[in-house]
Image: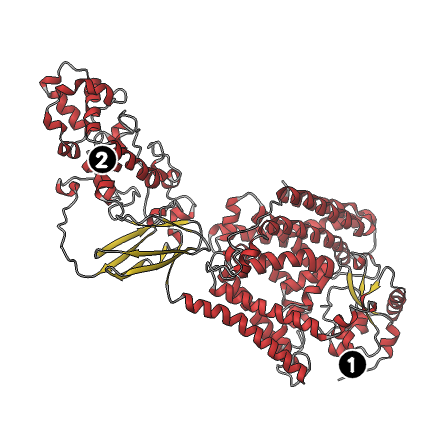
Amino acid sequence: MRKEWIARVIVIFLLAAAIGIPAVGWWKRSQGIVIHARMAETGGWTPENLTVAVGQPLHLRLTSDDVTHSFAIGQSDQPAVEVKPGEMTEVTLTLDHPGKYTFYCTRWCSVNHWRMRGIIEVTGQQTTPEAVEPPLYILLGLDIDGDHDAEVVPAQMPSALRGAQFQNMVAAVYRSREYYQTHSPVELWQALRSEPASQPLADQDVWDLVAWIWQSNITPQELSVGQQLYTANCSACHGETGSGNGVFADLLAQPDTENHSVRQTGQMTIRPADFTDPVHILSASPAHLQGKLLRGGMGTGMPYWGPIFTEDQTWALIAYLWSFQFEMEKLP
Amino acid sequence: MSLPQEIPWLEKASSAERGAATRQDRAAPGRVNLLRISWLRPLLVSRWPQFLVRAVTLAGFVFAITAGLLGSQVGSHNFAIIFVWIAWWTALKLVFIPFGGRSWCSVCPIPLPGEWLQQGGILEKGRRFGLNLRWPKRLRNSWLQSNGFLLIGLFSALTLTDPRVTGWVLLALFALAIGLSLIFERRAFCSYICPIGGFTGIYARTAPVELRVLDNAICAAHIEKTCFQSCPWGLYPVAFRDSSACGLCMECLRACPKDNIAVNLRPFGSDLTQPGSRTRLDAAFLTLVMLGSAITFAAVFTGPWGSLKSAAFAIGSLAWLGYAVGFLALNLLALPGLFTLTVWVGHKLSGAKLPLRQMIAEQSQALLPLGLMAWIAFTVSFALPKLSYILGVVSDPFGWGRSLLGAAATRWSPDVSGFSSILQVILLFTGLLWAGRVIRQRSWPVLVFCLGYSLTMLWLLVG
């Protein structure tokens, strides 16, 4: 009988260890905040809503349940961190201003990648209330959902370098930052065309002049920042060359295919806009593009970037988009 | 309780057959009795070594269930997926079955709690629990096991990759085994339900290990039949014609007062070529299901077809229904139909007088080495490249990002691609040659069937 009892003790001891060790580990883990990342089709971030008091450090442990994701916070300097399957990435955030912050994935994890977003609500008293101004496209009352095809387009790609020789013919009003933000290249071209001063110029010369005026409103730094943002966030759909042929473009163009990720978007999507097409782009003002960028939608599947990009980043991105239409000075 | 009624095999075996078997066993051609090796004998006779291994596998099994349910959802970082579907499966296919037949059954943890309850103790017997009913006669075959394996095949893509599902499946098997032990006598679950036990049993006939009686006359004179009384599987060793049913638990030799039982090493495939060996139609069907499953798994897991993979994975979807219909049609119609046709053609050509059912059953033995080698070849490409994950999950069994050994970071990953193709060609060729030796009456249509199967596997695995 002693042997039997020894055997029973061994079995019970081993079983207790086999259940107890993982159970204790599981209980300890459930104490901290662990965020699981999954492709948007299978749930996105869990949990996706967090609340923290202002100035309080927020300690997060991030892991992925499928593919490699990345964690970043919109409108903040916090560097993005990789979130790998089966591994833990630890991040400590301290958010100094009350409000809602959007955290999001920066890896093209699936066609619905941009839907991987969550909210960190930072609670507390606002010490100095900030005046918030609506974005320009709201102030101007622009209809960003309508189609605006350009009535006139250049015969060849306008060149800022060629346009520079006619710069003395341009009135100061057309060169202001305000004019640039609120007018489309077509509007500028039509305005210049009707100016008596530019009557001697050929149509293409006026387009070159438009390119020069646009370039004079854009700094090389803006172009460089815009290019980085574009490559990281936009080229998945719009393509590296801006021609609307990114890796997800075909999936977006056929939303009713058997592809499971597309089926679950819940709305129709169309082929991403082609930024190299002058008919489509030259009729849009920077404010118009800003609206499309901030709000998204338009019945196309375009994400909303309002909670992600700062105002400066938005203008930098728009600046870069013009490089698909105009020959501007090469970046250093 | 009158003993002879409890031993159906004894009634069925004619005295001439028994006499023949006795003479053969005495001669024991090409056999090495492991019990005659002085250092090995105590390891087999004592219950302790086996018990300790069983205690560890039981703890490991429960640990796999807990890890599956509570650990990381990333398969490659979860102990349950890697240890059950990579490490254990590889060991089963490459070591336990080909070299030990049902040797895994002797240490398998799944039936243990039920068996201990049934006999009222772990090493010693005490007060018994359970109803101890007899297993229904109509279900005393491998049809349930074949269907169980088909069921696994339908859901395999998800089960093999999702730790939660794996955890629940293991838990369900565990509960089923314990539950059945409490209702039915002996190892009803292992003998008639366990899908692993089903194919382990049929392939055990090819393995180089057997448990046999040394002298049938001694057993005939032994009134108590202690071996049968003590066998957890309800088997009577005198009746063994092949190794498909014996779970190698060694209880009979511990109970035999006359030291009349041998654990033999024997040539590979001995059960297949000996004249007395027979197969039933249910075993023939299971053999064909194993062939069909090997093809399907090779196509789904190692093939280049992404849409097939996602179809097998998207359980409940229309694509998956298509996969399910295809899988069932292959296993229930195509392979059995094709095999029956080839046997029938061979049958007509040879002019033999045997009934077709019996011919199918007998010729299906050739499919055992064929299927075994195909499974080994599949396992080589499926599991070997992933063996490197084992170190990672040993270090961090739940995928919680904690490294116990510090090994998770420095992961060793061997490149087996070139070497494994050569190995697979050799394995499939060996299977074909071996099958050719087992085919009865040199039936060339069956040989063509085997050749066709090997070429299909070759195409799927090596390309």
Question: Would you say A328 lies left or right of B277 here?
Answer: left
Q: Chain of mark 1?
A: B
Q: What residue do we see at 64% from left, 76% from top? A: B115
In the rendered image, which quarter is residue B273 located in? bottom right
Q: Compare residues B195 and B51 and report the one nearer the observer.
A: B51
The number of numbered badges drawn on the structure is 2
The picture places residue B211, in percent across and down from the top left corner, at 78, 67
Q: Amino acid at mark 1?
A: Leu
**Quarter of the figure with the N terminus of chain B:** bottom right
Residue corresponding to mark 2: A147
User: Which percent across, then down, holds residue A241?
Assistant: 35, 31
Residue at figure coordinates x 65%, y 78% from the top left:
B122
Label 1 SS: helix
Per the image, the residue denoted by label 1 is B3
Q: Residue at x 78, y 61 (%)?
A: B278
* Colour mode of the rendering: secondary structure
Front residue of this view, candidates B108 and B17: B108
Around disc 1, counting alpha carbons within 10 Å, would you say few (fewer than 14), some (14 to 19), or many (20 or more)?
A: few
On the question of residue B132 being in view, the answer is no
Question: Share a chain, discs 2 and 1?
Answer: no
Is A182 left or right of B357, judged from the image as shown? left
Residue found farthest to the top: A200
